Image (cartoon, rainbow, N blue to C red):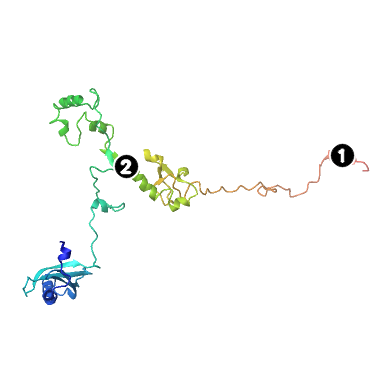
Amino acid sequence: MSAATTRSRTPDRLCAEAVDLARTAAEEAAAPGVVGDHEGLVSEGDRVVTHYFGCTELGYRGWRWAVTVARASRAKVVTIDEAVLLPGPDAVLAPEWVPWSERLRPGDMGPGDLLPTDAEDLRLEPGWSGEDEPPPNAAVSHEMADLVEAEDAEITAGPPADLPLAPPRGSIAAVADELGLRRPRVLSRYGLHIAADRWEEAFGPKTPMAQAAPAPCVSCGFLTPIGGSLGQAFGVCANEFSPADGRVVSLSYGCGGHSEAAVMPKAPQPPAPVIDETRIDPFPLRAETGPAGPAAEEAVSAEPGHS
């Protein structure tokens, strides 16, 4: 038989009447003056009743003091079982605890904050792999590593593996360090996919800005390409007037700041004037009288009708 069927529905009379006893127990457990009015009772079982009192303490709105009283079979003395502060139906409760790794959101980090990454973070994968066994004469083979370690034993205090900040010579880490691959881990395919989804959601073709854009970013002169596989779908906006300036944008994104959206026309060149008013035409101050001298007189006397 379950506990629900054995619990008495009718409160015990003596336990139900022990309101003053329950209030005294609540006032002893609480600070003075924070126990409010009696808010009812609940039968917890045979001769077991819980009295509820309001809590007037600041910061505990909707909470109630619960005092459970009981009496033994055939006994007339009611005793206190416990007195606790419990949240009511309308109580203000703290949110459910969530680990920091699930609470953290983009933009939460500030200056000086450090964000550790899990060793098994699915967004990362090893920058180099040692699964393939190298040839015996390779620089990363075990045989070559042993030879290098034996040569360095005479000039170093210990084997290279014990030296700080230097991986063992002849190891995969040493070769990777020598080639400039100093990152122990790089983005995995999963890390690339979730980054691409996040960037496309913020600056992708489905955003309202891109829907109203005159052209996509792939044809914009302000788009700065990026390397790697992400460069096939994303770039960096370099237009200071664009809402995506300095952000990674999808090649299908677009905005009103497209370099070819509204090209400023050149100043029109006026046609050549019919009357050139920019030049100066010289005019003589006196009218010319004709040729002078004896030759001119002879020419005039030789004209017909001249006497």
Quadrant of the rendered image containing residue 75:
bottom left
Q: Residue, x 88% and y 41% (percent of image)?
A: 300
Q: CA distance from mark 2 to mark 1?
A: 111 Å
SS for callout 2: helix
The residue lying toward the viewer, choosing from 182 and 249, is: 249
Q: Which residue is mark 1?
A: 299
Q: Which of disc 1 and disc 2 is earlier in sequence?
A: 2
The residue lying toward the viewer, choosing from 107 and 189, is: 189
The residue under label 2 is which amino acid type? Tyr
Q: Residue, x 16% and y 25% (percent of image)?
A: 151
Look at the image and tell me in which quarter the N terminus lies.
bottom left
Q: Measuring from the top left, give residue 143's x and y in whole percent.
A: 19, 24
SS for callout 1: helix
Q: Is residue 234 visible?
A: yes
Q: Measuring from the top left, give residue 63's x and y in whole percent.
A: 20, 69
Quadrant of the rendered image containing residue 140:
top left
The residue lying toward the viewer, choosing from 40 and 254, is: 40
The residue under label 1 is which amino acid type? Ala
Q: Is residue 147 left or right of residue 219?
A: left
Q: Which residue is mark 2?
A: 190
Q: Is residue 112 visible?
A: no
Crowding near the residue tagged with mark 1, few <14, some 14–19, many ≥20 C-alpha atoms within 10 Å: few
Between marks 2 and 1 in the image, the one whose residue lies nearer the viewer = 2
Q: Residue, x 15% and y 63% (percent of image)?
A: 3
Q: Which mark is residue 3?
A: none
Q: Measuring from the top left, give residue 274's x and y in whole percent.
A: 70, 48
User: Is the C-beta separation of discs 2 and 1 under 8 Å?
Assistant: no
